[in-house]
Amino acid sequence: MTAPINRLLIANRGEIAVRIIKTARRLGIHTIALYSDVDAGAMHVRDADEAWHLGPAPARASYLDAAKVLAIALEAKADAIHPGYGFLSENSDFASACEAAGIRFIGPSGAAILAMGDKSGAKALMQAAGVPVLPGYHGADQEAGFLRDQASLVGFPLLIKAASGGGGKGMRRVDQLADFDDALAAVKREARAAFGDDHVLLERYLPRARHVEVQVFADELGNAIYLGDRDCSLQRRHQKVIEEAPAPDIPPPLRQAMGEAAVAAARAINYRGAGTIEFLLCGGEFFFMEMNTRLQVEHPVTECITGQDLVAWQLTVAQGKPLPLTQDEVVLRGHAVEARLYAEDVGAGFLPASGPIDWLHWPDGIRIDTGVGAGDAVSPYYDPMIAKLIVHGQSRAEAFARLAEALAALTLGPLVHNGALLLRLCQEPDVLAMRHHTQWPIPTDPLPVPDLAWPLATLWLASRQRKGQAPGPWQQTDGFRLGAHRHWTAAVRIGDESRTLTLIETAGAIEWQGIRLPYESGTDYLRIKAGDAWQRYPVKTQGQHFVLPLQGRSLPFCEDDPRHQARPDHQHGVSTGEIRAPMHGIVVALLVEAGQRVSKGQALLVLEAMKMEHNLRAEQDGVIAALHCQQGEQVSQGNVLVQLSPDKDEQTQADGA
């Protein structure tokens, strides 16, 4: 048996680092955190027994600097390194370097990572092991013309995927041959930036397929088992949004066949530790996609249905001990669902966001895996995931209902996040009926303002007037009435919508749409009684605005002047021609030159943020008047990157109008 682990270095950050620290502390293991400049005060640094400075904020100068991480591990006298997921977790050279230095790498061998990290080679290994694989091209010839010919043979639609990829990065769907070259160039750029390797593979794209993955575990004694499966079909941009376990609506024989195929895949490379075999399920057939040679973001749902701590299993296996269970002893109980809470602007195409978290209230009664708290911030340098909300129920319906209830109670701001979308997905009929798939279109159209928000905002503004706080000049009405009733009137703006409402108050209650709602108000909250239950709504102040948490959303509202008229330029939709950076990022490609004529919708440049590429496009026909950025330049949100002058003919017509 290998010597015990007494000192563990965590080569990661955020919620996974916090999670590893929690399990290690329960096992009596001393924890060592790493941090970049921007993470000096982060939760994982605060929670660890000790912490070492790693380097500047950019990941390549800190968390991806394998030599520096290993040097700190040696100096800190760590027995082992846990890489979490992302960063160095699937870096075969780093795993091998740890082994050579006498430090245990909490994961598989470098050889196993290398075998599965090369997706082309992995497909060949799986075929040899009898695991079904998708048709495609997985060879070494990377010449663009040759790949185009292979794409024609594979057929459309197809996926171009980074051979060393993962996490949905370095991947493009192509529906016709005419789009292949541009998509290939984009995938190669993303692959070089994220993985340092621009080799790609091609594979058939299955419409309406489900993404089902199997959790495998193996030890150094030759034991290998699977711990159930997960459905991860709810995705945007090939990245998972909501995951659940076990995968629903799978006949037992098919479930067993996938589990046994996953174990065969692990045995084919003499695997050790936690791994995930990802399959595409279409009808009654399943096909190997890839193996993630690490712990998955969605591992908590497997922990919930098995009652096991998978991080503890990793540490057990790394110390040469046998797996805690045999296959026959694995029992699955109930259903679990996990929602990934991201800092992102859903309405703007899931653009990643960053910024401070000034207020935060997590819902009670569920598991929250997070690396941030109130007063922390989401950095533009790393993945924008804020937290994972995990619910376990006796049935799938119960788990989704409890998750929806939790998301509705979430209060977080002013950072923009996808909480409202997650709540919406938990209530979507297609999702609840298991009619969704990997290509199912996630709804991103703006949600209407909840009806209850209007009387709550009106009541808040009116109660401020009653307490002597000066209202706006257009709201100088004291609401006084002779008799039992009192009327409260306020002009309210919620987001981009305005209304003027009058509420009737009597005996500590308001009347709204024929419903009588008893209420209480404090300096920072409202309470409304609906039926027999009181519901508390904390209200946050942001300058002249207020924020109301309701149904999983943070709704900004303020007093509004009903006489307000839109400015002429807004009325006529005149554009400034400034193309600004929608988020912090790096300009990885300039696609135009100064003086070039462009068309509306034409891609002008490619901005990489959070390891994903985003095309910035012309908002109108025109001419590139100036470029305010260079390829390779780091830019900040709001920076003007391109100045576009309108087309002269269109400008003449507009002036004449």
Image (tube, rainbow, N blue to C red):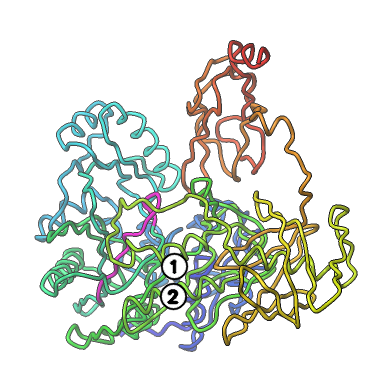
Disc sitting over residue 4 in the figure:
none
| Residue kind at label 2, given as amino acid type | Ile
Gap between marks 1 and 2 measured at Cα: 7 Å
Q: Position of residue 345 (x, y in %)?
A: 55, 51
Q: Is residue 416 visible?
A: yes
Prevailing secondary structure of the magenta residues: strand
Q: List the residue tagged with mark 2.
A: 390
Closest to the observer: 573 or 577?
A: 573
Residue under the point 32% across and 28% down: 181
Closest to the observer: 613 or 514?
A: 514
Q: List the residue tagged with mark 1.
A: 339
Residues at discs 1 and 2 in contact (Cβ within 8 Å): yes
Quadrant of the snapshot with the C terminus: top right
Q: Earlier in the sequence, mark 1 or mark 2?
A: 1
- Lateral position of residue 234 relative to residue 323, left or right: right
Q: Quadrant of residue 653?
A: top right
- Which residues fall within the magenta stretch? 228-239
366 lies above or below 141:
below
